[in-house]
Amino acid sequence: MRHPSFRPLLILIAFICLVSLPTSSLVSAQDDPQAPLVVDIQYTDLDDLAFFAAKFDVWEVDRKLNTIKAMITQADYQQLIAAGYHIEIDLPNTTLVNAPLKSLPGQRSGISGYPCYRTVEETYAAAESIAASYPELATWSSIGESWEKETPGGAEGYDLMVLKLTNSAIAGDKPKIFIMSALHARELATAELNARFAEYLASNYGIDADVTWLLDYHEIHLLLHANPDGRKHAEGGSYWRKNTNDTYCVSNSNYRGADLNRNFPFHWDSGYSSILECDETYRGPNPLSEPESISISDYVIAQFLDQRGDDDNDPAPDDATGIFIDLHSFGDLVLWPYGFDNTSTAPEPNNTQLQTLGRKLAFFNDYSPEQANFGYSPASGATDDFAYGTLGIAAYTFELGTFFFQDCPTFTDTILPDNLNALIYAAKVARTPYMTPSGPDALDLAVSPYPVAFNPQFTLSATIDDQKYQNSNGFEPTQVITAAEYSIDQPLWEAGVTSFPLLPIDGVFDEKEEAVSASVNTLGLSPGQHILFVHGQDASGNWGAVSAIFFRVDYAVYFPLVMH
Ligand SMILES: [Zn+2]
């Protein structure tokens, strides 16, 4: 009974008939009593906000105006009016969520009206094609079944499929990053970003030096469609969020299903999810009640070591490994645990470490870096709390862009490039996500001359910069650069590797951004392509993320010269 002024009214409301909606532009919403409304609701205090966030499908919170934007049923609308809340119907968004999708002229693939987003089938075919084209780098395998597939006698359903990317020719334990998308069905940009990340990695192996070392020495696990049953409804134009489990909300099939991002076991049902089956934030009857969440939980637990104690206040060690990212829409946010209530934070030092990596990821996508319960709203039973809380791995939720059915130009021009850079950075630091993001970045790597042919010496240059953080929410401390080094062909993090210094071009390490260079000697190297690894250190002793560049040695050209 979080909200005593509201709950008793539920009984009275049954006797209040629906009033007619205030405009003719809501034709479909008026015709269909199940049609959703998008509304702006004035809340009075934080308890009020928490109650709405737990019950409703909240799209946005404006803490200055004390309003939330939410998609609600017409019954909810009547109840809120009767309870005395000030509510305004958002006509453009209500019209939008009730409008059927229309294909663009000549559109042959993708979601109708949104050709940049592939359907479930098209996404699965693309992933299968990656695995077929790059068998040494990619495998595509089932980790479980959707509710419809698992349930006899109903619709066909889908397997939940993971695309695993790593160079299988290099053995050994490798740091892992797990990225999932489309857990909420209508969040169209998320699965496409994940699929494009896979395509970028596979097609740039051996071409881009960073992609090459990432796949040589890491495992990248991508669950492209975490809720394919729900997604098929969204592809038909519905703003479907939950899975499609029809044992819940049997009275109104448009609102059936469980909210999979409220169904995970860490602090499940801690007050920030709904107990009502027809609500969009329905948590399910018990933790992991749904086949999708069971499959995801089992897979993640099988992949990552448990590196944290069982108490909420047990931190994972500084050298804990592994990153978990759940891609959602929308809000332009990078969020980290805890999010299960309004007050709890992850234990130190992890809380600060999660914030540091959050600010770094947000530097790339220019989102707001926030603890999951800040500014937005708490949510219990979410995936990021599960991944950090259960295993101690660094866990994040991205809220991509500015709408569920994001327009294609915004996706292609902004969301995709910015977030690809954020995901690449995340992969780079998956080995030690609580340490490396504090260190400076190695940028602008260059080799001159290229290719290395006429002289066994060449110049390697780079910029070492400690300032690449998104500081819109607090200010990340930064330090002057104190060192930089490189290695040839052997990664810098491996034991016993031979490393060489890069020195400041202006003669002294005394700035937070330093241009550095070194003269690299190639004598003794075999002909062909080689890779240089570079990283820098700041005055706090933090080594930052590695960047790499290829160079070629062509002895056929220069041997006659050096032997002369
Ligand atoms: Zn979501």
Image (cartoon, rainbow, N blue to C red):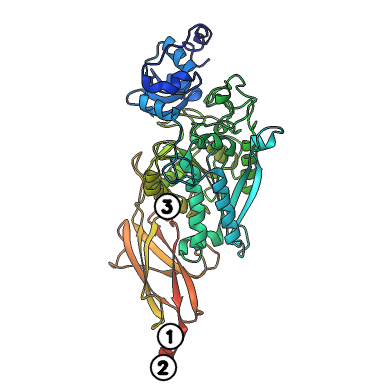
Foreground mark, 3 or 2, reads 3
Q: Residues within 10 Å of mark 2 (few under 14, many from 20)?
A: few
Q: Is mark 1 within 8 Å of ligand 1?
A: no
Measuring from the top left, give residue 5's x and y in whole percent: 46, 10
Label 3: how many Cα within 10 Å (few below 14, some 14–19, many 20+)? some
> Which amino acid is tagged 1?
Val
User: Which is nearer the N-term, disc 1 or disc 3?
Assistant: 3
**Observer-nearest residue: 519 or 347?**
519
Q: Name the residue under label 1.
A: 557
Return the x and y of residue 413 as percentages of the image width and height. Answer: 37, 49
- The amino acid at mark 2 is His
Q: For the residue marked with disc 3, what is the amino acid?
A: Asn
Q: In this view, does 24 lie to the left or right of 50?
A: left
Q: Can the viewer see residue 154 in this picture?
A: yes
Secondary structure state at the residue bearing disc 1 = helix
- Taking the spot 51% from the left edge, 35% from the top edge, the residue there is 236
Q: Which of 528 and 228 is in front in this view?
A: 228
Residue that badge 2 annotates: 564
